[in-house]
Amino acid sequence: MLRIDIISVLPKLIESPFNGSIIKRAIEKKIVEIHFHDLKDYASNKRKQVDDYQFGGGPGMVMMIEPINKCIDSLKKNRDYREIIYMTPDAEILNQKIANKLSIEGNLIILCGHYKGVDQRVRDKLITMEISIGDYVLSGGELPAAVLCDSIIRLIPGVLGNETSALSDSFQDGMIAPPVYTRPANFGNMNVPEVLLSGNKAKIENWREEKALERTKKIRPNFFN
């Protein structure tokens, strides 16, 4: 069973995405465990302080190393972790290859950034992997952590109803997925391509490959550089 521990200043902010749909079913099936940790529980003073002003001056507060170190140490005493991941915009951008890799590697700790970020010593000494979900800044790393977890969990065998569904997703083969259709075959003046109604599996696969290539060239031409 994969265990993911999520460390956050605002754990309530991230709990909702795990209470429904595919992730909820994965938890109920005991395929994955998700645990949330309030960083303030590891603060060393009565005010539950986990951030402070940055040395050298400047706007914005910085997450302190001491409570983060204490929380991670506490978790590592009970089990091994494959990666300790920091969600931050200034990192490698999440892609399908990363999600595939993390889905089979073992237990994970995810640290959600907040405020102006974390003390650099956290990144230098405690973090083993940094991930961004895009070149933009959010108020915290909670939503990116939920995105990362969803991208990982859906790949674990037994999570999706159809075991092969994830294999045909966009990016799994370096291509964007082809268009998909369902009933009705005719809607207004819009018709489903006849090849998809033909029952000829070889022709259907060829059509899908052609459309996938066409869409990828149009939407993500950088894939061919």
Image (tube, grey):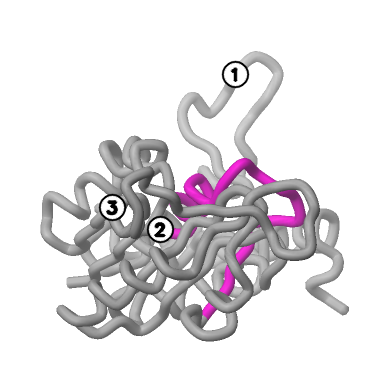
Q: Earlier in the sequence, mark 3 or mark 2?
A: 3
Q: Nearer the viewer, residue 23 or 192?
A: 23
Rendering quarter of residue 181: top right
Q: Which quadrant of the rendered structure holds the C terminus?
A: bottom right
Q: Nearer the viewer, residue 40 or 133?
A: 40
In the visual, does 140 lie left or right of 44? Answer: right
Q: Nearer the viewer, mark 3 or mark 2?
A: 3
Q: Which residue is mark 2?
A: 149
Q: Residues within 10 Å of mark 1 (few under 14, many from 20)?
A: few
Q: Is residue 61 above or below residue 212?
A: above
Q: Which residue is mark 1?
A: 187
Q: Which residues are magenta?
A: 129-148
* Residue 193 percent location from the top left of the image: 64, 41
Q: Is residue 20 above or below residue 96?
A: above
- The residues bearing labels 3 and 2 have C-alpha atoms spaced at a distance of 23 Å
- The residues bearing labels 1 and 3 have C-alpha atoms spaced at a distance of 56 Å
The answer to whether residue 94 is seen in the rendering is yes
Q: Earlier in the sequence, mark 1 or mark 3?
A: 3
Residues at badges 3 and 2 in contact (C-beta under 8 Å)?
no
Q: What's the mark number on residue 41?
A: 3
Amino acid type, label 2: Cys
* Residue 144 percent location from the top left of the image: 53, 52
Amino acid type, label 3: Asp
Residue 80 in the magenta stretch? The answer is no
Instruction: Identify which residue is drawn at 34% across, 80% down.
Output: 104
Residues at badges 1 and 2 in contact (C-beta under 8 Å)?
no
Q: Which quadrant of the rendered structure holds the N terminus?
A: bottom left
* Residue 71 percent location from the top left of the image: 31, 67
Amino acid type, label 1: Phe
Instruction: Identify which residue is drawn at 76% across, 56% down.
Output: 135
Q: Residues within 10 Å of mark 3 (few under 14, many from 20)?
A: some
